[in-house]
Image (cartoon, rainbow, N blue to C red):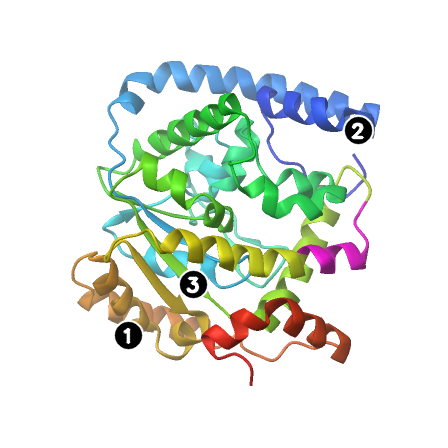
Amino acid sequence: MAAGKRRFNLGWRAYRRLLRRWGAQMPLRDRLQLGSLAAWLSLFEGMQNAAFKARKDSISLAAPVFIVGNWRSGTTLLHELMCLDSRFAFASTGACMYPQYFLFDPAARGDEAPLRVKRPMDDMFVTASSPQEDEFALLCLGAPSPYEAFLFPSDLASLVRNSSLEHLPAAEQAEWEQIFIGFLRAVGIGAGGKRLLLKSPTHSFRIAVLKRLFPEARFLHIVRNPVHVYASMIRMLREMTALYGIGSLATDDEIADAALHTIPATESAIGQAAASLEIGRYHQLKFEALIDDPGGTVAAVYEGLHLGDAGEMRRIVDEEMSRWGRRGNAPPVLSPAERLRIAQHCGAIMDKYGYRN
């Protein structure tokens, strides 16, 4: 791989999936490096599965809470704030980035002195013990994942389609479910029976499947001004594909088109699925409200999803946000042409949530 490139910890199943689909675009050096790493990781994965099988099989995954919403809409901030509640458990960065062996490794679990790393798309820091997006674990474990596009950016246009499971053959859907549940049970081993709090924008397209798998699940939907989402998503896609890309990088126009297609598609998928959710199973909030009144907004989440008393969390969240400040709310620098395209693609969202002015 080129100097400066990062790599995901792709196990053998993930490597074989990439090879079948993208082998012609993978230089020999990359295939050899990824294949060697995949073989070792899958050895560790087999050892972890064997060592912890009985404990994983005994884990109950009742009523997890899923945070959904557009990429760059505030899902990470909301996730980190709510994970301050000791009543929740979550998938850590170590678990998501090293899913094949994190149960063996104190450093991957975050039990040892953490290394703080700044995320490539913003100023937020993560450690091995920080809450993380479980989609990275699914990618590494070989589940069908839209995050293959970070490695092969020519596939950015399929981000929406590949987030959904509906287009997959029945066997691949079953494989995805098996990998996902297996990973969550592994996370649950250290959870002490706590409710899991999970977040990934990709789950916005899987609510029907998640509802079937977890009949008592809750869904928390955060929305943000599409102008801000677009500008931040452009940076995310550019940074992630530059860091992890094996195939040719996407052009600025391709990245912009992917963002403009993804924003309304994500909102539409959540809206359609939310219509079938009972009261107390779905709650919506705005990023701007979370910034302006963090404690009050989180308290409304607890009430809306029947998550218990939020009295102490109001104080904790307000204190945390006083340190975080009001970053992320400054108007993005966009050209008039870009603002016009956003209005054309996302006008319904702007009207629905009052973002026109």
Q: Quadrant of residue 254?
A: bottom right
Per the image, the residue denoted by label 1 is 296
Q: Quadrant of residue 215?
A: top left
Per the image, the residue denoted by label 3 is 222
- Indicate which label's residue lies in the foreground, 3 or 2: 3
Kindly tell me whether residue 241 is visible in this rendering. yes
Chief secondary structure of the magenta portion: helix
Compared to residue 64, the image places residue 141 above or below, namely above
Three-letter residue code for mark 1 = Gly
What residue is shown at x 56% (from left), y 34% (from top)?
Answer: 167
Choose between 52 and 176: the one closer to the eye.
Answer: 176
Residues drawn in magenta: 249-258
Per the image, the residue denoted by label 2 is 26
Whichever of labels 3 and 2 marks the residue nearer the N terminus, that label is 2
Within 10 angstroms of label 1, few (less than 14), some, or many (20 or more) residues? some
Three-letter residue code for mark 3 = Ile
Whichever of labels 1 and 3 marks the residue nearer the N terminus, that label is 3
Left or right side of 204 for 111? left
Three-letter residue code for mark 2 = Met
Whether label 3 touches label 2, CB < 8 Å? no
Cα–Cα span, label 1 and label 3? 15 Å
**Percent from the top left, x then y, of residue 331?**
61, 80
What residue is shown at x 42% (from left), y 20% (from top)?
Answer: 48
